Image (cartoon, rainbow, N blue to C red):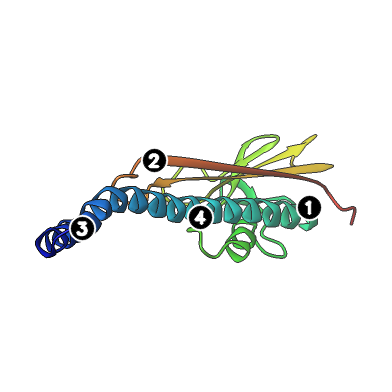
């Protein structure tokens, strides 16, 4: 092999690394972005689950699940509101601040569902006046975090606990 052919071979291999990087970089970027988005969604799902668990615990120890507020029957907030318990357990979630009010003899709801906020519903068995079990559902829907992944997603978590006797 002559000196000129070795020199030409060296110059040709310099561009090879750039071409390989051009093939590998987009794939690596997509994989890394997917890992970050998956971690974010797992984190959000964990927060929604923690919120539902804390809300059901608070509902099970409230001295009275409902009280009359003006013309509505709403959650009693004693010792603290279910919304506050959810917010404390999952501080990374924006919790809908609307009060939980009765929509039927067994159901409390915040009324209007708000996007990008955790919305709470409470179901009591057999009824809100004397429940033996309480089920709290926390629902969250939001937009994706990365430009190619901007679809709306929804998460729900439900927790059912027995009501503690006073």
List the residue tagged with mark 3. Answer: 13
Which residue is at a point 71% across and 62% down the rendered structure image? 78
* Residue lying furthest right: 165
- Classify the position of the C terminus by image quarter: bottom right
Q: Is residue 70 left or right of residue 136?
A: left
Structural distance between the alpha carbons of marks 3 and 4? 39 Å
List the residue tagged with mark 4. Answer: 39
Q: Nearer the viewer, residue 46 or 30?
A: 30
Circle 4 packing at 10 Å, graded few (<14), some (14-19), many (20+), is: few
- Classify the position of the N terminus by image quarter: bottom left
Q: Is residue 30 visible?
A: yes
Structural distance between the alpha carbons of marks 3 and 1? 71 Å
Labels 1 and 2: the sequence-earlier one: 1
Structural distance between the alpha carbons of marks 4 and 2? 17 Å
List the residue tagged with mark 1. Answer: 60
Structural distance between the alpha carbons of marks 3 and 2? 46 Å
Q: Is residue 26 left or right of residue 108?
A: left
Q: Is residue 43 left or right of residue 75?
A: left
Q: Secondary structure at mark 1?
A: helix
User: From what the image shows, is residue 127 above or below residue 110?
Assistant: above
List the residue tagged with mark 2. Answer: 152
Q: Secondary structure at mark 4?
A: helix
Q: Nearer the viewer, mark 4 or mark 2?
A: 4
Q: Nearer the viewer, mark 3 or mark 1?
A: 3
Q: Nearer the viewer, residue 50 or 133?
A: 50
Q: Nearer the viewer, residue 115 or 28?
A: 28
């Amino acid at each position: 092999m002559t000196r000129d052919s070795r020199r030409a071979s060296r110059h040709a291999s310099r561009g090879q690394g750039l071409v390989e990087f051009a093939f590998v970089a987009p794939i690596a970027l997509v994989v890394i972005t997917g890992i970050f988005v998956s971690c974010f969604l797992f984190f959000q799902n964990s927060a929604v689950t923690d919120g539902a668990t804390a809300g059901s615990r608070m509902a099970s120890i409230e001295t009275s699940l409902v009280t009359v507020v003006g013309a509505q029957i709403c959650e009693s907030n004693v010792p603290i509101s279910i919304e506050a318990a959810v917010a404390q357990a999952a501080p990374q979630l924006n919790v809908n601040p609307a009060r939980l009010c009765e929509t039927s003899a067994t159901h409390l709801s915040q009324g209007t569902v708000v996007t990008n906020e955790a919305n709470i519903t409470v179901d009591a068995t057999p009824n809100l006046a004397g429940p033996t079990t309480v089920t709290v559902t926390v629902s969250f829907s939001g937009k994706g975090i990365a430009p190619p992944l901007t679809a709306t997603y929804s998460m729900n978590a439900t927790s059912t606990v027995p009501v503690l006797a006073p």
